[in-house]
Every structure is written in structure tokens, then in C-alpha cells.
Amino acid sequence: MVISRRALLVAFALPCPGRVPGSALLLDLGPDCLVQESLAGFRNVLPALSAASHSTLLIPGAGRLPQRHSETIRAHLRRGGSVLLESALGLQHGHVAVPYIPYVDFTWPVDAKIREFFPLVLQPKPGDRVIATYAGKPVALRRQAGSGSLILLGSPVGPALLAGDADARRWLASVLRWMHTHS
């Protein structure tokens, strides 16, 4: 039996010390989550979640978003909730900067350098706030959507969370604090 490095990393991920405070509902996309280590990273640092309703929805490693999940996201935003959507579509493009730059520069809500994970360059719309760049190009943004807020990540941070990256944990904790105060 052959086991990939990714499968091994996800299977043996242990809860890391220094969990991120706050609560959020983590949406597992199942086969539509292209980066299982991202899902594992978020699970690793978030406190145990109850089934109670949460104003914050986290969607790690998204590839395709089935209609039912798209409707859930839209409804959540209409109700004034916050959504962090982590796109893994950069995996399909496989572009990296030349010369290679290993970090994404986050500028909101705190400055942080987080290891890149096949970043997808985003096209901001008027009113969007670019919150992270890779090689000078936007790879994360914050958008007002309905009564809620959408944070779209074109470079997954979950793998950095799984690896125990302190900047990734600090950045996520700051984002969750902001999301809870603005939902």
C-alpha cells in the first residue's frame, strides 16, 4: 500500500498547543475540499465546536462549491454573518512567482507572513479591500456581502496552521476576533 506524504500528514496531525480562541462553524466540503491538510489545520487549532449556531463560517480548501453550499454561504451573509472562504483553485493552475517568493504578505487585520500554498491571484471588485499579496498581486480580500462580510483567501492558510506556524495562528485569531465583533 502506498501512502502519500499529504495523507500521512493529515492522518497523524496532532492537536497543537496554542489553540486559536473563538468559535466558528467549520464547513467540511468532503470531496470538494481539495486540500485536506487545510481542513485538518483548521480543526487542529479551533476549539471544539458545538452544534449551536455561529455567526462565523469557515470553509477551508474549497475547490468546487456545490449549489447547496453556495446557498448556505449566501444565506449566512444575508443574515449578517461572516464567512472565510479559502480557495484551493491555485492548485489547478500551479503558477508560482519567478523568482520564487515563499510567503504571502498579509496586511490585515495584523501584518503576517504566511507560507504560500499555490496562491490564486484574485480580481478585486470596487469596494473590496485587498488584505494579502503574493509577489505584489492580490491573493486575499475582504468584501461586504449583503449584511455580512466575506473574506476570500486565494492561498490556503490551513496547511500553515497544521504545521504549527505561529504567524498563521496569530493571523487567524485576529481574523476571528474581527469577524465576531462585526457579525
Image (tube, rainbow, N blue to C red):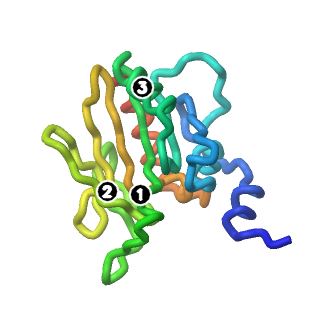
**Few, some or many residues within 10 Å of mark 1 (<14, 14–19, 20+):** many
Disc 2 marks a residue whose amino acid type is: Val
User: In the picture, residue 144 is in which quadrant?
Assistant: top left
Which residue position holds label 2?
Answer: 139
How far is the residue under mark 3 from the one under mark 1? 23 Å
Disc 3 marks a residue whose amino acid type is: His
Earlier-in-chain disc, 3 versus 1:
1
Q: Residue at x 62, y 56 (%)?
A: 37
Q: Is residue 128 left or right of residue 153?
A: left
Q: Residue furthest bottom?
A: 99
Q: Residue at x 76, y 56 (%)?
A: 11
Q: Residue at x 47, y 41 (%)?
A: 65
Q: Is residue 76 left or right of residue 162?
A: left
Q: Residue at x 62, y 47 (%)?
A: 31
Residue 155 numbered mark, or none? 1
Which residue position holds label 3?
Answer: 180
Earlier-in-chain disc, 2 versus 3:
2
Q: Residue furthest front?
A: 67
Disc 1 marks a residue whose amino acid type is: Ser
Residue 18 image position (x, y, % from top left):
61, 46
**Few, some or many residues within 10 Å of mark 2 (<14, 14–19, 20+):** many
